[in-house]
Image (tube, helix red, strand yellow):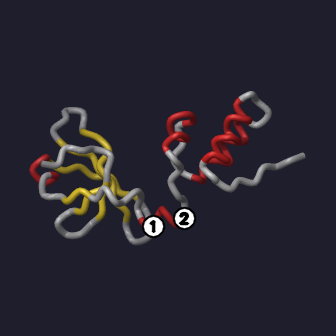
Amino acid sequence: MNDTIGIFYNKPDGTLVKTYGFTGSGAEILYTWCDDQGYPHDETCTDAEFQTWTPRRDVKDFPQWEKSDPLLPYSFDLFYDIKRRSQLVPLYEEIKGSDEEQFFRELLAEHEIPFSFDEE
């Protein structure tokens, strides 16, 4: 029985999708998938359809996104509510010069994420 939201699944046609929630009534599952150009599409499905999908716990991101804008480790989402590397620069610009900057630098170093700081 499929009961995990927030992981990847293969639909019977082979499409890779990621579930992320429920509709307001809770009757349908919300999911997203990527087309060949990497554009996301949000859709819903019934629980009966969801049960035909195969969990893919080995997949951490859509292949199209992994190359162009990789996911960050969970701690960045936890502390800063960001999920992708493209969000690092705007975040740094926001916290630059604050007490938070040192923690941000330590987090980058801990996860060995290369980042270019504008040292003045």
**Circles 2 and 1: CB atoms closer than 8 Å:** yes
| Structural distance between the alpha carbons of marks 2 and 1 | 7 Å
Lateral position of residue 41 relative to residue 12, left or right: right
Q: Residues within 10 Å of mark 1 (few under 14, many from 20)?
A: some
Residue 15, numbered label: none
| Depicted 61 relative to depicted 95: above or below | below
- Disc on res. 68: 2
The answer to which quarter of the image holds residue 63 is: bottom left
Q: In the image shown, does 8 or 58 lie closer to the viewer?
A: 58
What residue sits 13% from the left and 58% below the top? 52
Q: Where in the figure is residue 2, as x and y percent of width and height? A: 17, 49
Helix, strand or loop for disc 2: helix
Residue with the most extreme front position: 110
- Residue farthest left in this picture: 48
Residue 3 x %, y %: 19, 44
Numbered tag placed on residue 64 in the rendering: 1
Is residue 37 toward the left or the right of residue 110 in the image?
left
**How far across and down, in percent of the image, does residue 118 sit?**
82, 49
Q: Position of residue 23 (x, y in %)?
A: 24, 38
Image position of 34 (left or right of 102)? left
Amino acid carrying mark 2 in the image: Ser
Kindly identify the amino acid type of the residue bearing the numbered disc 1. Answer: Gln
